[in-house]
Image (cartoon, rainbow, N blue to C red):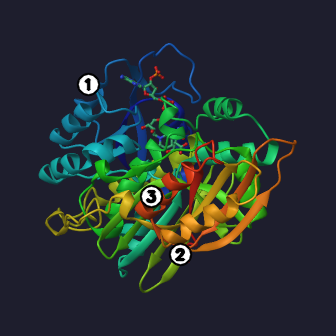
Amino acid sequence: MKVVKIGLLGLGTVGGGTVNVLAKNGEDISRRIDCQVIVSSASARDITRSRICNTDDIELTTNPQDIVNDPDIQIIVELMGGEEPAKSLILQALANGKHVVTANKALIANHGNELFAEAANNKVTLAYEAAIAGGIPIVKAMREGLSANSIEWLAGIINGTGNFILTEMRDKGSAFEDVLAQAQALGYAEADPEYDVEGIDAAHKLCILASLAFGMPLNFEHVYTEGISKITPLDVTYAEELGYRIKHLGIAKRAEKGVEMRVHPTLIPEKRLIANVDGVMNAVVVKGNAVGTTLYYGPGAGAEATASAVIADIVDICRQLDAPLGSTVPALGFASDKLYERPTLSIEDVTTAYYLRLSVEDKPGVMAAITKILADNGISIEAVQQKEPEQHGANAQVIILTDSVVEKSLITALEQIESLDSINQPAVRIRVESLQ
Ligand code: NDP
Ligand code: HSE
């Protein structure tokens, strides 16, 4: 049987998981592709450390160049993370005529246009299924399964760590920092967990999904990004009383004046399937103009779940090794000369409904003043509730659900509301999406 040699750059959570899954399922994988996939070498910073996988048959090195320049290795699997040295190593591997598999969404979102062009120049594949939503084969679904459709919008829970934190806080009342530490111990979090918590990792993934959906070059700078660090248990509770869940969503939408790309906490009606996606699980809803709404669900992070996507890319490459050049699916699902730049909408021009929480002095006339300002700015109210103060003299909480409004009108209204004498704290505002 033909043997395909793999070189792993990185032997941490995903690298170790990849070795383990290949060991566990190697026979079945060989049967699928009629060749044997062998991890012949792997690099790490410290090769004396114990690993989650057996490394007895793997040549270990601290110098990734040894692997990238090894003529016996056909596929380089980059699982180091970060921009450098990962980018230079991938470029060198591509120049050496090797196929590359990566799980590095930061690298693809920021440098994918250049890297895909380099792969095409060298007539090799740069595959990245594991970069988005862990084990969910969403790249394949978008690029191939939905290719008959014009995609109208997609919305996803695309960061496992963030969803795990929100779920544990809601279900167990756990403290934010404690749950983040658990996510790190489980290998879910990025090397810098700010990427998870502040929405940067989700923004990387959303940027790639938007390009796959709308056939445009990667444009990370235009993704609006908000994380989960300001979500309070109070808002989680009030949202649930109104029949909503708060989820951190990445949303890409084809709007009349441009493409929306945004990542932020969002209230979703609790009856939507995606509102019930908990823990490290991810889910992406994609609305195509032929198929309608489809949902893709699965583990968004973790060693073997992510390895599943990494190995699916390796399998695809093995199947193509003897195929005629040019027969592979383009990296973003459209031939590179058919990727069109599209205008992106700034967040001030995006239209959504809102959840507002206003902390107000418990005095007559406050509610009338607030509703007048909203009406003066053309903002309709869908629902309103007043929570009486728990102690005499404390602030009351006014919860408002608005109808859809252009963000800049809402900002103007909130500035006027916050200048009222009876309001002494900034308003909390969270976008609301019906996802229909
Ligand atoms: P880890 O930190 O667990 O592993 C990184 C590996 O790369 C380690 O073996 C490390 O060596 C090695 N490494 C890191 N920097 C360097 C460097 N400068 N030079 C040489 N070796 C280096 O990361 P993960 O496995 O969690 O993540 C890997 C990639 O996969 C990232 O791009 C991440 O975003 C992505 N990803 C991760 C998922 C997950 O669930 N963890 C899911 C989907 C994608 P050493 O072990 O000696 O420190
Ligand atoms: N840190 C990422 C997450 C890993 O939690 O989703 C998977 O991309």
Mark 1 or mark 3: whose residue is earlier in sequence:
1
Q: Residue tagged by mark 3?
A: 412
Q: Could you say which is closer to the camera, residue 22 or residue 265?
A: 265
Amino acid at dot 3? Thr
Amino acid at dot 2? Thr
- Which residue is situated farthest in the right direction here? 391
305 lies left or right of 328: right
Amino acid at dot 1? Gln
Residue at 31%, 61% in the rendered image: 211
Q: CA distance from mark 2 to mark 3?
A: 36 Å
Q: Could you say which is closer to the camera, residue 307 or residue 108?
A: 108
Q: Looking at the image, is mark 2 or mark 3 nearer the viewer?
A: 3
Q: Quadrant of residue 177?
A: top right
Q: CA distance from mark 1 to mark 3?
A: 55 Å
Q: Residue tagged by mark 2?
A: 294
- Counting from the top left corner in percent of width and height, residue 174 is at 77, 37
Q: Looking at the image, is mark 1 or mark 3 nearer the viewer?
A: 3
Q: Which mark is residue 65?
A: 1
Q: At numbered mark 3, what does the secondary structure look like: helix, strand or loop?
A: helix
Q: Is residue 30 above or below residue 183?
A: below
Q: At numbered mark 2, what does the secondary structure look like: helix, strand or loop?
A: strand
Marks 2 and 1 close (CB-CB < 8 Å): no
Circle 2 crowding by C-alpha within 10 Å: few under 14, some 14–19, many from 20: few
